Image (cartoon, rainbow, N blue to C red):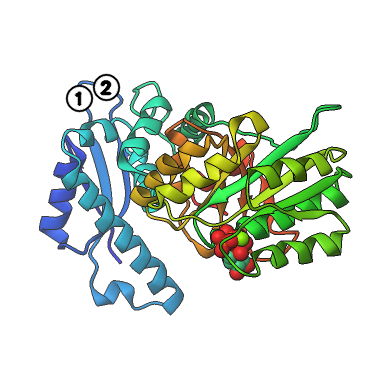
Amino acid sequence: MQIHKYKAKSISDAISMVKNELGQDAMILSSRKINGNASNHAFEIAAIASNADTLNTSSGHYEEVKTELTNIREMIYILNNSGSFVDKLMVNPETLLIYAKLLRNGINDYYARMLLEKGGAFENSMPDNLKAIKTQTLKALMEKIGIHKPFEVTAGKQTIAAMVGTTGVGKTTTIAKLAAQLTLKSKIKVGLISIDSYRIGAMEQLKTYANILGIPCIPAFNRKDLIAAIGKLKQMDAIIIDTAGQSQYDEKRIEELKNIMTDDLEIQSHLLLNVSTAEEEMNKIAINFSHLKFVSYIFTKLDESEKYGSIINQLMKKQFPISYLTTGQNVPDDIEQASKNRIAKLLFNKN
Ligand SMILES: Nc1nc2c(ncn2[C@@H]2O[C@H](COP(=O)(O)OP(=O)(O)OP(=O)(O)O)[C@@H](O)[C@H]2O)c(=O)[nH]1
Ligand SMILES: [Mg+2]
């Protein structure tokens, strides 16, 4: 396998030289800036031709090379389609790897650029190595996102939380996980209320969990019932309210729920979002459910996705913090209190 080296004034020129001489599928092994002078960058790329001779080693190695090749194609695509942003990326060429990783993770292009910018990745003073750029980008992310802890009990003050969201997003299961963890681990007294007059059996699901835990569970079909149920549970440290799943487009039903959980009851709603929901749809859900004045996001079903960009995109919008992440169907284990470190890992797609 022969390694060829190419030097050029810009990385795009160097890549063109590689493509011309070694073909479209040439594999780039490394790229580096060889002149620190800001006004006169020079780049060196090391590459090999991608013919069968170079790939006839073990199948493990072949797979590795194939992945690398896909990544290189993706980077060439990014370079060809980023307009003047390419110049910024090339101040520290390692930035390109991070940028590609963010986009692959489903991070919105706008936020990917913003985080890199805020992290100083385009500054000449930034050391051109992956670790330094990643650390700064993560720092930029951490400054942008907020964490909420709904059940940090302040002495004498009762917490009333409600889980709201679209059908099947995981509201009832999440309540069961939370009720179990709060009751068993945190020794917090929890009572449950179910506002679901739409689905036969909805109450039964919640009641089953409540019976196992030995905690109260009360149905409520209207505002009067809800006030009475809250009254019955006034000795509890926390009340968690389950609500019927709503379509984000069914404004009438969202309004109905708002008329049951009126502001004076001081209920803190949390909006559950499935991580696999497309960004545009997630935006609509957040906007339409905002009538319920939710105070945090709970992202569900992380175990069913390989990309977590949707979480970062939603949190970067900065309106609401995140409280929990759910990672599977097991009650009570598959739930985690969100933390900045956990979200930081998700940025680079580590679950
Ligand atoms: N894989 C996975 N499944 C989950 C998770 N959370 C909930 N589920 C599953 O999603 C399905 C729906 O969960 P529910 O808790 O009934 O959802 P819901 O939001 O209460 O549904 P409605 O009351 O019908 O609106 C069930 O099969 C749950 O086991 C999760 O984090 N990961
Ligand atoms: Mg439910």
Q: How many angstroms separate mark 2 from mark 1 (CA)?
A: 5 Å
Quadrant containing the N terminus in the rendered view = bottom left
123 vs 265: above or below: above
12 vs 60: above or below: above
On the image, the x and y values in percent for residue 29 come to 33, 54
Residue found 67% across the figure and 33% down from its top = 265
Q: Quadrant of ligand 2?
A: bottom right
Residue found 22% across the figure and 34% down from its top = 85
Q: Is residue 309 left or right of residue 93?
A: right
> Residue 177 lies in what quarter of the image?
bottom right
Residue found 73% across the figure and 63% down from its top = 331
Name the secondary structure under disc 1.
loop
Mark 2 and mark 1 in contact? Answer it, CB < 8 Å.
yes
Quadrant containing the C terminus in the rendered view = bottom right
**Crowding near the residue tagged with mark 2, few <14, some 14–19, many ≥20 C-alpha atoms within 10 Å:** few
Q: Residue under label 1, please give it.
A: 40
Going by the numbered disc 1, the residue's amino acid type is Asn
**Crowding near the residue tagged with mark 1, few <14, some 14–19, many ≥20 C-alpha atoms within 10 Å:** few
Going by the numbered disc 2, the residue's amino acid type is Asn
Q: Residue under label 2, please give it.
A: 37
